[in-house]
Amino acid sequence: MQRSESRTRIRASKGNVWQPPLQSVYKLNFDATIFTDLNCFGFGAIIRNDRGEVMATMLVKRPPVTNKLIIEGDNTNVMRAISSSLPNHSLLGHIIEDVKREENKVAHVLARHVKNTLDDMYWLKDTPPSVVNALYQDFINTNE
C-alpha cells in the first residue's frame, strides 16, 4: 500500500504573479521608492525576455527632486485602477494589470536595494544577489 503525502503549497494566484511577455518580446518592469532617512530616492528596473531570463537590470540613486519637479496628470484614476482587485477592462487594462505590486516584485526589490548602494549600478544578463529570491519566485509561479 502506498502512502500519499499531503503537501501544502503557498503561492499567489495566477492573476497576481509576473507573467512573461509574448515570444520574441521583452518586458520592462520598474519601481521607485523614497528613502526619507537618507534624503534620496531609488529607482530599479529589470528587462526580461519571454522565458523570464534577465536581459538587464539597473539601480539608480538620486537626491530628492521635490522642489524641482512638477507632476501633472489624472493620477487618481490610475491609482484607483492599480489598487482595485477587480479586473480592468479599459483599453489600457493589460498595462494596469502588469503594474500591480505582486506582478512587479523584482523591480520593487531592486528599488529598495538602492538604499545599500553608493553609486548607480547596471548589469547585463545578471542581477544583484538581493533579487535572486524574487526572480526564483517568479520562475516557480510562471512554470506551475
Image (tube, rainbow, N blue to C red):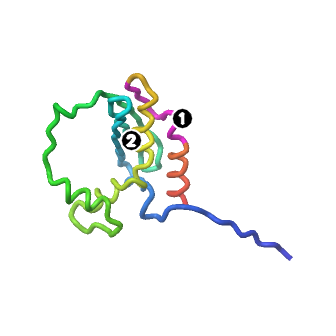
Q: Position of residue 18 (x, y in %)?
A: 43, 54
User: Looking at the picture, how far across and down is residue 131, in whole percent?
Assistant: 50, 40
- Image vertical order of residue 118 relative to residue 70, above or below: above
| Residue occupied by mark 2 | 47
Which amino acid does the dot numbered 2 rest on? Ile
Type of amino acid under label 1:
Pro
Q: Is residue 124 magenta?
A: yes
**Residue highlighted by disc 1:** 129
The magenta span reads 120-132
Q: Secondary structure at mark 1?
A: helix
Q: What percent of the width, then of the height, locates residue 74?
A: 15, 54
Q: Secondary structure at mark 2?
A: strand
Q: Quadrant of residue 66?
A: top left
**Residue 47 vs residue 104, the one in the foreground:** 104
Q: CA distance from mark 2 to mark 1?
A: 16 Å
- The x, y position of residue 67, in whole percent, is 17, 32
- Mark 1: few/some/many CA within 10 Å (<14, 14-19, 20+): few
Q: Residue at x 46, y 48 (%)?
A: 52
Q: Residue at x 45, y 40 (%)?
A: 54
* The residue positioned farthest toward the top in the image shown: 118
